[in-house]
Image (spheres, rainbow, N blue to C red):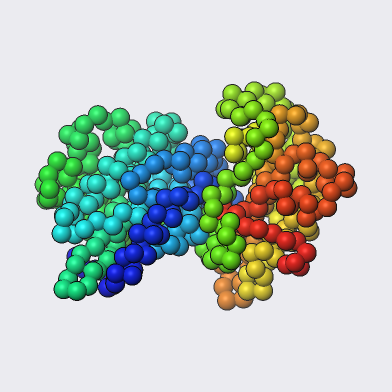
Amino acid sequence: MKFMRPITATRILLFIVTTAVLLASAPLVSAQVSPNEILDPDLKALEKQYFSQLKSLNQAIAKLHFPFPFYLSRYVGIEPAKQAETDSRGLEFVKFRDRTVLKITGNYNAAYSSTQFTRNERAARTFQDVLLPILQTVTQGIPPDVACDAIGFEVSYHTRAAEKSYDYEGKELLVIVVDRSDAFVLAQATNDTARQDVLNRSMIFLGGQEFGLSLLEKDPYVVSTLPRTKPSKSDSPSTVGSSTTLSRLNRAIPNAIPSVAAEASSDSSSSAAAKPDLSQARPIATQADVDRLQSQYQAQLDTLSKDGQAKFQFVDYDPPAFVVIGKQLALQMTLRNNLRFDIEKSSIYKRAAQTFDLFLAPKLKDILDKVPDDNAIAVYDFSVINPLTSGISTKERSEAIEFILPAALARQFVNNEITNQALIDKSQVLVNGVRIALNLQLVE
């Protein structure tokens, strides 16, 4: 295979250090496609139908442990040092070869030696260590009759080889598309022989070429001997293509700006895990607590959703709901900002400050007057979708500013007992899933 660039001993050391840092600071938030941003009507309907399941899957995948760090991502082939800061929309419904596919995309930070592992062994190891655990998680989070034709993976990983006095490092892209029914069989298979049977009839590409992945042999199978269904349309096999152009974070958002964390690099907390460090005074919240409050206040939440869409710019695809954040019970609400920002003339900090001061804060009192007043609610989680414009592009982009506010302090703020900065100082502010420090007055 063709390796992409020389690396020196310094780069090797940097890669090792970066990998260690990533292992210690893997992100705990996840991205999700926004139904109202999807142009294809069929994909939009699917995203809306399965939105809650996909949010849960994003969170579940982010908690999985792998031999090396794995990041869900909107793009493959991203350098390890930049993966934590880039667009993390890695789970979506897409069109691929006239089929509807639930696609999982990500970057795996393993760096396989090409002298120790064949191409087949590298792909097989990635399948066993990464794709299979994710598939098992996905099939537990969606119904067997999920309304798509297949489940697909698009994962990039690293390869390394030595030549003379230089090391060379490159990337390989593994794409696997498994029929929906086969995906559940594959997830439940208990041995490699049974798994191999499913893979033999699935679509598999390595480096853009059809590939006969073998879990049982050192070398791959000859593709022409495998019982694969021939695709009806000759799309590019190098990637599971997507007609979805925009997305949302349940903790990210449509076409999120990938340079968010780069702008925030001066803040030492930007590389920390983004899940909020909330008060430990309350008992740890459980799913049973979520279910109890959701059932108890469902009628009130339905009214809040309806009023919110009419008065407060609540989105229609993600109604208010109880969730667990940082072991605390939270009420989560998603709004779409009616302000638009020019990304060429503003920073993430200024947009975050104006989003709070000019959009969310003026609505906060009226919203809190309508939410359930229950002492069990520890925090309010407001995700605000910001439409972005650019003088150099007509394509709409968006970002998510998430404000995780302690419930007691939020009510003090709306009662004019504390300032906006005092509230923000005790809250968590995330931009596309990356936590930032925010001084409201300084950035205005």
How many numbered marks are there?
Answer: 0
Name the residue: 75% across, 43% down.
308
| Residue 290 x %, y % | 62, 28
Name the image quarter holding residue 352.
Answer: bottom right
**73, 146: nearer the viewer:** 73
**193, 113: nearer the viewer:** 113
**287, 7: nearer the viewer:** 7
With respect to residue 249, does 393 lie above or below?
Answer: below
Which residue sits furthest right?
Answer: 416
Name the residue: 19% across, 74% down.
165
| Residue 18 x %, y % | 40, 59
Residue 361 in view? yes
Name the residue: 83% across, 38% down.
369
Residue 181 in view? no
| Residue 347 x %, y % | 65, 68
Name the image quarter holding residue 162.
Answer: bottom left
| Residue 75 x %, y % | 42, 59
With respect to residue 360, does 288 lie above or below?
Answer: above
Name the residue: 38% across, 56% down.
19
Which residue sits furthest bottom?
Answer: 392
Q: Is residue 87 left or right of residue 66?
A: right
Q: Is residue 163 left or right of residue 285?
A: left
With respect to residue 385, does 46 lie above or below?
Answer: above
Quarter of the C terminus within the rendering: bottom right
Quarter of the N terminus within the rendering: bottom left
